[in-house]
Amino acid sequence: MVDKSVIVEKTQQLIDMTAGFCDRYLDEEYKELCEKLIRKMSRKRNVPFLYGRLEIWAAAVIHAIGNINFLFDPSFKPYVSVSDISKYFGTSKSTVTQKSKQIRDMFKMRVWDREFSTTHMMEHNPFSRFVMIDGFIVSIDSLPPELRETVLRSRNQEK
């Protein structure tokens, strides 16, 4: 059994490490998403970052968030490469990519993930204007106004 103070200490170290990277290369939203993910990881029964180098975990957290938000696509802003992340933390790209996959699988993170997507990604989600009604996928815009309002209100409550 691991002492809770160790978890708290390592959680804060990871948050500080990712915040430093986000301040230098990314933005406040990425910083908040990384902290949210780290805190969620710290609540797992078996806290994954208690083992291994914290630099690898910090890089993997940024990579996991970046992966689902197209951070590695130069046509998006902000943009950084996997090499930039690895170089900053002094880690191997392949190790970071493997840990990132482990994190994404652990939390079932995918593109347009409601919990870990940036505002830009959620605003440009091509599926956000569709809803399933009686087993059929229909555009929200095709619904009667009162039903459209109900659907949109329930979506806003989920956020």
Image (cartoon, helix red, strand yellow):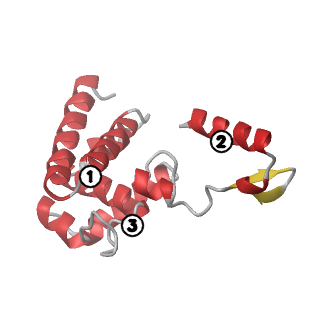
Q: Look at 52% across and 48% down and name the residue there.
A: 114
Q: Look at 20% across and 34% down and name the residue there.
A: 12
Q: Residue furthest bottom?
A: 74
| Residue type, numbered disc 1 | Trp
Q: Residues within 10 Å of mark 1 (few under 14, many from 20)?
A: many
Nearer the observer: mark 2 or 3; the answer is: 2
Q: Residues within 10 Å of mark 3 (few under 14, many from 20)?
A: some
Q: Is residue 29 left or right of residue 15?
A: right
Q: Is residue 59 above or below residue 33?
A: below
Q: Look at 52% across and 52% down and name the residue there.
A: 108
Which of the two labelled residues, at mark 2 and mark 1, occupies the earlier sequence position?
Answer: 1
Q: Look at 25% across and 70% down and name the residue there.
A: 82
Mark 1 highlights which residue?
A: 57
Q: Residue furthest front?
A: 145
User: Which quadrant does the N terminus fall into?
Assistant: top left
Percent coordinates x, y for residue 87 in the rendering: 13, 67
Disc assigned to residue 152: 2
